[in-house]
Image (tube, rainbow, N blue to C red):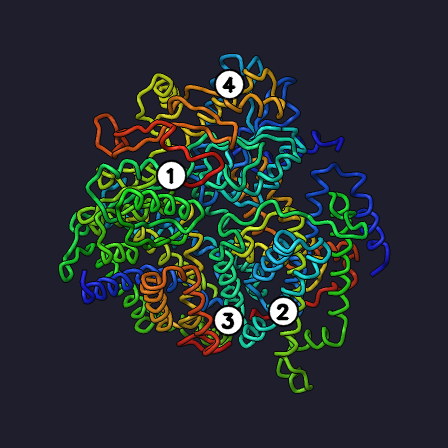
Amino acid sequence: MTNRLSRRRLLGATAATAAAGLLPLPAFHGSARAQAGTLRLGVPTAVTGTWAPLGAQVVRTSRLFAKTVNAEGGIDGRKVEFLIEDTQGVPANCLRKAQEMVEREKVNILLGLMASSEALAVMPKLAEWNALFISSINGAGSMTAEAYVPNMFRANTSGPMGARAIALWLEDQPATEFFSLSLDYAWGHSSVEVFEKLITGMGKKAIGKVFAPVGTKDYSTYIARVRQANPQALYVALTGDDGTAFLRQAAQYRLGEKVQIVTELVDLLNVKPVGESAVGLVGSSRYTFAYDTPANVDFVKRFTAEYGEVPDTFDGEHWQSLQLLAAAIRKAGSTDTKALIQALEGMELTSVKGPIKVRACDHQAEQQGFVVRVEKRDGYPHPIPVVIKTYPAARVTPECRKASY
Amino acid sequence: MSRLPWLAGIAALAAAPIALAGFHLGLLTEVLILGLFAMSLDLQLGYARMVSFGHAGPYGVGAFAAALLMAKAGWPLPCALAGAVAITAVVAVPVGWLCCRAGGVAFAMLTLAFAQLAYAVAYKWQSLTGGSDGLAGVPRVAGPFGLELFTGRVGYYALTVALVGSALLAARAFVASPMGRALVAVRENEARAEALGFDPRRLRLAAFVLSNALAGLAGALYAGHVLFVSPELLLWTVSGHVLVMVILGGTGTLFGPFLGAAAFLMLEHEVSALTESWALILGFIFIVTVIVMPEGMWGLGARLLRGARRPPAVEPRHAAP
Amino acid sequence: MDQTALFVVQGLNALALSALLLFIALGLTLVFGIMRIVNFAHGAVYMLGAYVGATAGQATGSFWLAIPAAAVAAALLGWLFERLAFRPLYGREGTAFLLVTFGLALCLTEAIRLTWGADARRLEPPEFLGGVVFVLDEPFPSYRLFLIAAGIVAAGGLWLVLHRTRLGLLIRAVSQNPAMAGALGVDVRLLRGAVFAIGCGLAGAGGVLAVPLITAYVGMGASVVIDAFVVVMIGGMGSFVGTVAGSALVAATQTFGNFYLPEMALGITYALMIVVLLLRPGGLFGEEE
């Protein structure tokens, strides 16, 4: 397509006129302006729709990364530019956007995909596109198991790893009877499966489970079910707005007074709107800003200076994936897909979440597991997650190409 | 209508693989598939005033059927497409029989309910459908006798053009047939049509099944195009989008929905590349379109082509259902 | 928890849910009854109410000011939209309204995201509604009891308006026979604007009432409108009594269904609607078109 550039520019001009400059333009810069040697990274993510709050984290952390490395002269002397486009969290859109980035914009590195179904839709195409995808969010265990492809790496903690960390913590706790409440979604199912298996292996009892559809607004009937089962502890695998709604309603029913609630994912996204009643909640954490290492303190400082708030779970996870990519590019001395795959396999790095090692066999980054408790601390307008236990990578990462333990 | 636009259209579609780069050919394939999907809804909506709000149902069933026939049963692509259409049509008979008992909004809500039930089944039947993750990496199985012709990108485009074109001709033939005319008669005045000896319910059922079978074909082609299916294909939002495409393009025209689908997809795709607030622009365009183009894009285009002297092709219709 | 307590608590849960559904469904059915249009933007208006209410509540520190603020903002938007976008369309087919309300839903949702950002907003009920009351020794949130009361007040208030005021008389007249009412000198255009505004206002109030349970967030309007459609269809399009009955039936089905048959949660409401519509295509209290 020879007239591609002019068409883009034309469209840009039309839209700009139409919008009269009222609308915020994303961190996208038309290819016409791309300098030679600029490294362009594709981020097809959910800016609008149900996943928008998580997409917002991916967008802002990408921008911060570009700003930070470009101020330092780029990666290996190459400036970084992000191509961020909205998929609404719909796999069909994600496929189309990703394909356009690869085939039309000549991008070969994709990051920030949101829903697991989006990632799983894109993964089989990567070889044909000769593109690399580094996951920073997707938790589905299958991505590094039966759906494994050589062109995908997972920099983030997977769902099963989160379930493993909280199960390990519960081993030393007095509660012996557990009930599970989870999102009716692949991630929720695999988390509950892993959790129940680990708990029963410790000689504790899983006395029931229930799956609530994604988008459930009224949790009262599920809370009644938990009360009727009367477990000593409740394991919760809910995310996003579903998690917020449940935690708020559970507090209103005083569920925490009768049952210890532990959760697979503690996010500020949930903690902030739940407020004071989140205090005391214990759960697994993929990333927390309160983790005290030099790399993380530096990141939190930069982030807070830029955005006026502390980074949340997927800010940290996305940052880690970008650090990993930058290190791989430096090591390979190239951005070629094959060279990057080779560089990433077996790579070790100290990131915001501590030491990580990308294993070659299934491309999962081995990393520590965190258990946090939500506490009230001075200097923060909302309760914050504080790390109460850290497990070494060897204890939380599943065997190669396994989604279970 | 003169032959010139037809020939121009065919020539443009034939030239597309040469003129367009890889990605755009894929996009054109998707536009054609969505156009077929929208056109299939127009058969019900435009000619029988059956406002289906569950057209994602047959689309998703067709997509899952084709994907499963290729991925699990190993059927070659053309056989899987044919099988998917057959399955969708068979499912449509009892569903249509039940839905056509009601009219108006009740019909719309019944179709919605069946599509949502299909969504629930696809979501929960994880061992077969992959559940919320869907089925990825569906193979485009080449058959014997050199049928791998269709497995490449250009080949698949050619197959899509051929099938969508055939479907369009079939739909036109149906509309022009005595049955199609009877359907319009029922739409205009049910009591009179009944007095003339037509059976409105049977006619509606026929339109429903044909419409669903073509939607099934569209779904199957989509599955073969992206090689991925997930329960989202069956969700009510998809039904809403296809309804918007038909209305945008112009109901009761068969061609209009292709325009509507192209406009919808291209607008969403291109505007969302320019601003994250694409929804604001898109929504505004829809509102303005309804107000300034009462007959949809096709109606406006047809009127401009013919000049204002001759009457429009679309019969004006009054009174909301 | 013993069986009696469970049953009573679940009954109250169902009533509270039906109160929330009622706010959305009453607006939908009112608009359908008088304008014969299916309003796709109703969920987005509900969301607008939630955000405006949360902001107003935060700014004034008063939950009681948040409710009217949300209702008025939503009603104003409805009134404006009826004037600007619906007026040119009367006399056109119902599908035109479908597209125009779909456009409005897109615009409104994005405008809200632009204004308030992607993060959820919270609003706490006043202190005395923030606690629990004990129902057969089970803690039950006072706020849910308040929701039940609010539902009763809204339904009762609307019933009084419809049956005891001149406005209500006109609404019922136009709803039954718009041509006749117009011929008798009723200003149908003005009435449509008023009805659409009232419908949106109810949705806005419903939105802010939901915030203490679920917070205000970008996706909250998407699925709620479908639930409300189902309520309205089951009860009978345009029927006030039907909508009240429909919301109770849907709420009970979801509350008890998700308890005993959680695996069916995705489909149970639709199964209920199919059964009702096949037996009575006009809904429980409506007439077939």
Amino acid on which the number 1 mark rests in the picture? Asp
Amino acid on which the number 4 mark rests in the picture? Ala
Q: Earlier in the sequence, mark 3 or mark 2?
A: 2
Q: Are marks 3 and 1 in contact (CB under 8 Å)?
A: no
Amino acid on which the number 3 mark rests in the picture? Ala
- Could you say which disc has been placed on residue B90 in the image? 2
Tag 1 secondary structure: loop
In 3D space, how far apart are the residues under numbered discs 2 and 4 (Cα atoms)? 56 Å
Q: Which chain is home to disc 4?
A: A
Residue B131 in the image, given as x and y percentages of width and height: 49, 52
The residue drawn where x is 45% and y is 74% is C275
In 3D space, how far apart are the residues under numbered discs 3 and 2 (Cα atoms)? 23 Å
In 3D space, how far apart are the residues under numbered discs 3 and 1 (Cα atoms)? 37 Å
Up-down relation of residue A375 to residue C157 (above or below):
above
In 3D space, how far apart are the residues under numbered discs 2 and 1 (Cα atoms)? 46 Å
Rate crowding at label 1 as few (under 14), some (14 to 19) or many (20 or more) other CA atoms within 10 Å: many
Tag 3 secondary structure: helix
Residue A207 in the image, given as x and y percentages of width and height: 28, 53
The residue drawn where x is 58% and y is 50% is B229
Report the residue marked by disc 4. A327
In 3D space, how far apart are the residues under numbered discs 4 and 3 (Cα atoms)? 60 Å
Tag 2 secondary structure: helix
Q: Are marks 4 and 3 in contact (CB under 8 Å)?
A: no
Report the residue marked by disc 3. B106
Q: Are marks 4 and 1 on the same chain?
A: no
Report the residue marked by disc 1. C119
